[in-house]
Amino acid sequence: MKRTRRSVTARRSRKTFLEKLEGHKICEIRNKREDIRCEVYHFECDKAEDNELVRRITKVAVKQRQYFYEIYPWKTRCKERWHMFIAMRKDERTGEIVICAWCSVRNEELEKEDGERKKAGYIVEVSVRRKKEDGGVDENYKGMGIALLRKIFEYSKERGVRMMYLVPSNETVRGLYMSSLGMSEVEGTSYLVKSTSSAAEDAETIETMREIIRVKRRKEIEQEEELYEEGLRELSERIRGRFIEKVDERKMSLDDKTALLGEIAMMVDDADEDEIIEYIDGI
């Protein structure tokens, strides 16, 4: 069958998936050696079209999970007020999409002590392609995590976000974020904070950001305590009494008490009171 000029032209003009995402592209980032470049795409989870695109990219990411360590941001679905920032490039040899880095951000309004509200962005998870096929460290994407976060801070500032905050995954990462991104600690919490503006006259002060996080954490603790007390009330009087004795004896933190209460709650349907008491006594 003879091809028409029209069908050949149509085939030539067919766009690749990355080309179709052109409207979502916000910037590019490079590795530390600056010899690999990845384009950063932004998706708003409140938009159905963006949600569908993230779903499609997730399928690509799942097949590449062996190149990432421990944290897989695509495992958490798009939620209200969430934003996905995904760095990708086309492999020139295979033509396939390569996921370079992925960061999920939740935008919200947080309160100061006086009730004034500030727009903030919480870095939920960030992960970078850093693992080789054989399990070794891949240096090709080194530096892209910090580069991506810097771009996210800049992009968020342009959209009215006053501060960014996160909980680092470990002490090494904490030190890296403080030295490379200039983030500050909030005493008594695991959070790090940073103003999105570097201009002294416009930036949120460290003390203001710390105050906001302390208010947030106090509300979180109040909510956790309410849920804990609610869970206690659902236990039988005998189990509840022994449980309280044990957590007081062990001087457990709220987090540890809540975790143990969750274990006991899961046992209630399948074990009798004596078995549960024995489990509590063995802790």
Image (cartoon, rainbow, N blue to C red):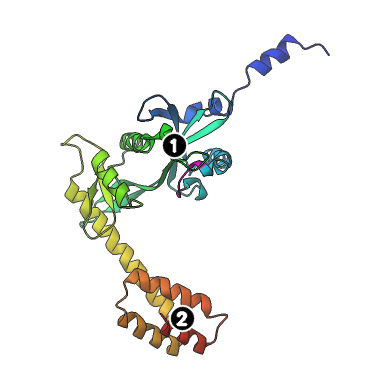
Image coords of residue 131 (percent x, y):
47, 40
Residue where numbered disc 2 is placed: 234
Q: Is residue 190 above or below residue 224?
A: above
Tell me what residue is drawn at x 47 percent, y 47 percent.
73
Magenta range is 67-71
Q: Quadrant of residue 84?
A: top left
Is residue 28 toward the left or the right of residue 161 in the image?
Answer: right
Is residue 223 toward the left or the right of residue 97 in the image?
Answer: left
Numbered disc total: 2
Q: Give the residue furthest to the right.
A: 1
Asked if residue 204 lies in the magenta stretch, the reply is no
Could you tell me which secondary element the residue under label 2 belongs to? loop
Q: Give the residue furthest to the top.
A: 5
The reply to whether residue 85 is in sight is no
Residue where numbered disc 1 is placed: 138
Tell me what residue is drawn at x 60 percent, y 23 percent.
15
For label 2, the crowd category at 10 Å Cα-Cα, with few meaning under 14, some 14 to 19 and many 20 or more, is: few
Could you tell me which secondary element the residue under label 1 belongs to? loop
Image coords of residue 4 (percent x, y):
76, 11
What quarter of the picture does the C terminus occupy? Answer: bottom left
Q: Is residue 245 above or below residue 211?
A: below
Q: First in sequence: mark 1 or mark 2? A: 1
Q: Quadrant of residue 194?
A: top left
Asked if residue 68 lies in the magenta stretch, the reply is yes
Is residue 13 toward the left or the right of residue 54 in the image?
Answer: right
Tell me what residue is drawn at x 48 percent, y 32 percent.
88
Dominant SS type (magenta): loop
For label 1, the crowd category at 10 Å Cα-Cα, with few meaning under 14, some 14 to 19 and many 20 or more, is: some
Q: Amino acid at mark 2?
A: Glu
> Real-space Cα distance between discs 1 and 2?
50 Å
Image coords of residue 130 (percent x, y):
44, 39
